[in-house]
Amino acid sequence: MKNQILLFVFAILLVSCSSPLDKPFKKDNLEEDIIELKKSLSEDELQMLAGFIALKSLGDDKMLGKTYGDLLDEAKKLREELKKQEEEEKILAEKAKIDEAERIKRLGGALTVSLFDKGFSEYNYQEYISYKFAFENKTDKDIKAFTGRIIFNDLFDKEISSLNLTYDDGIPANSTKNWNAQTDYNQFMDKDVALKNKDVEDLKVKWIPEKIIFSDNSTLE
């Protein structure tokens, strides 16, 4: 009778330990255990488990006493959390992108900035790229000052160069002003060389407004 009971208990233990996932993690046995785990796990699960163990090994987390099944469950949970976080970040990025596009459209509706000429000059051994801009105030209020960024793209919308633009000489309501500017030219900078050699007709100029200040000190940004 005792032998039958022992055999029964042994059979239960054998079944309960038959899966390699039930084995406790031991660093020294990892290579051998991985060989066994390959027989019962998909390639995706195996890679997930191996990556999770490697990640855990870099920190102070204790894995001793946990089975490979426990670690796989933790790995799956971590993947789901990261996936959820990634989706939330994606949604946030899309929202920020939409908000920025709406902001640029709103400020662009108040002020248009366009480039109508570009040249090159040399003075006192210093070379310059020169620009002629037209600013149009499309509002019913005088503009005191504004700031933003100009991006110069080629015909394929690939950025060539950019410059920060700040103007504080004022633009009356519903009127246009022309403005001349220049930047230092460096023959050893590819972006300067590319911009210098482009005609205005071969440039796509993008105006990214940041802030507009009106004469009554109200702002648009």
Image: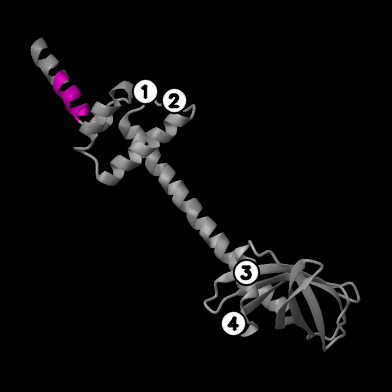
Which region of the structure is painted magenta? 10-18
Q: Which residue is at the front of the view, 56 or 190?
A: 190
Q: Quadrant of residue 62?
A: top left
| Residue 65 sits inside the magenta stretch | no
Q: Amino acid at mark 2?
A: Lys
> What is the residue that sits farthest to the top in this orientation?
2
Going from the N terminus, do you reach mark 1 or mark 4 first?
1
Q: Amino acid at mark 1?
A: Gly
Query: Is residue 211 among the parts visible in the rendering?
Result: no
Query: Is residue 143 among the parts visible in the rendering?
Result: yes
Spatial separation of the CA atoms under disc 2 and disc 3: 58 Å
- The residue where tag 3 is placed is 193
Q: Amino acid at mark 3?
A: Val
Q: Which mark is residue 65?
A: 1
Q: Residues within 10 Å of mark 2 (few under 14, many from 20)?
A: few
Query: Could you tell whether 211 is left or right of 35 in the image?
Result: right
- Residue under the point 17% across and 28% down: 15
**Of helix, strand and loop, which mostly describes the magenta segment?**
helix
Can you say whether 176 is above or below 20 in the image?
below
> What is the residue that sits farthest to the right in this orientation?
216
Spatial separation of the CA atoms under disc 1 and disc 4: 68 Å
Going from the N terminus, do you reach mark 4 or mark 2 first?
2
Q: On the rendered image, what quadrant is the N terminus found in?
A: top left
Q: Nearer the viewer, mark 1 or mark 2?
A: 2
Q: Which residue is at the front of the view, 31 or 75?
A: 31
Q: Quadrant of residue 199?
A: bottom right
- Residue under the point 56% across and 61% down: 93
- The residue where tag 2 is placed is 62
Residue 124: image x %, image y %?
82, 67
Q: Which mark is residue 202?
A: 4
The reply to whether callout 4 and callout 2 are in contact (CB within 8 Å) is no
